[in-house]
Amino acid sequence: MVRRIFASLIGLLSLGAALVAQSPDRMVEFPSGSEKASAYLAAPEGGGRKPAVVVIQEWWGLNDFVKGKADALAKQGYVALAVDLYRGKVATDSDTAHQLMRGLPEDRAIRDLKSSVAYLRTRSDVDGKKIAAIGWCMGGGYSLGLALAEPTLAGAVINYGRLVTEDVTIASLKVPLLGNFGGQDQGIPPGSVREFERKAKAAGKSVDFKIYPDAGHGFASATDPKVYRPADARDADARSSAFLAKILKGQGLKG
């Protein structure tokens, strides 16, 4: 009797471990230089190799908003990897978020993001030739930074992220970009967005930026109802989804 109970317990523990191991949504670790980085992984059901998206946090950290975006991308058929750039820290107020962002070494962040791409390419469920990036706010700037540092990406989405201004840097871009920006954004003014797009297109780059005239910074992700603009957010999400489907799944391509 005791042996049967013990065997049953062992069986339940083994089943539980198997279920955890097979869970499509979990935290994973991967090497980043001499350190370890971690990320929230959301993977779609079904076999075969799938396109993947690196999801890049706002200045708050790896919070529920970012994880939710990864989950939504997994439902669209992508292996989504939301990288934890703050190494476990999450802010709930702007002062803490500002401190965490200022304390984040840019070179380490880019290294973690490049390492996340390398990690995705080791996975048996990922098509290593079809990896893109998307980010919001601070993460939008790092989405561009990753595109510049990892020219093998299929594309990158920038949601009101910091842009570069140097002609030589813009000319070095090899990755198609989609951008969504606010016309009332004081930190990233519309003039700088138009200037980047003008320079990029003059250099023969694939750049599709949209400015929402009445929107401010964070219009698609802010929790403040005075900042969040539902209609603009839906449109930005639709543009992002169409762009990712085009570059990663070949949907919407002519010919």
Image: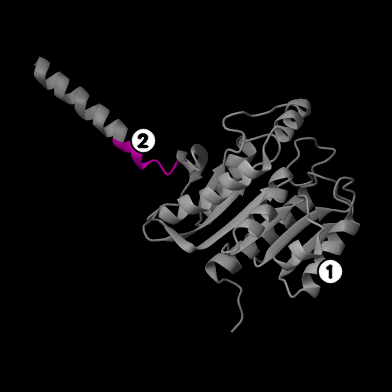
Earlier sequence position, callout 1 versus callout 2: 2
Q: Residue at x 62, y 63 (%)?
A: 155
Q: Say what amino acid the circle numbered 1 marks.
A: Arg
| Number of numbered discs on residues | 2
Relative to 250, residue 33 above or below: above
- Tell me the SS state at disc 2: helix
Relative to 208, residue 219 above or below: above
Q: Quadrant of the C terminus?
A: bottom right
Region of the chain picked out in magenta, as a range: 18-26
| Residue beneath disc 1 | 198
Mark carried by residue 35: none
Using the image as rendered, state which of residue 4 and residue 163 is in the foreground.
163
Q: Specify few, some or many for label 1: CA neighbours under 10 Å numbering under 14, 14-19, or 20 or more.
A: some
Q: Say what amino acid the circle numbered 2 marks.
A: Val
Q: Residue at x 63, y 54 (%)?
A: 146
Q: Left or right: 224 with respect to 83?
A: right
Q: Quarter of the image holding residue 101?
A: top right
x, y (%) of residue 152?
A: 56, 64
Q: Which residue is drawn at 52% across and 40% down?
A: 39
x, y (%) of residue 71?
A: 54, 45
Mark carried by residue 20: 2
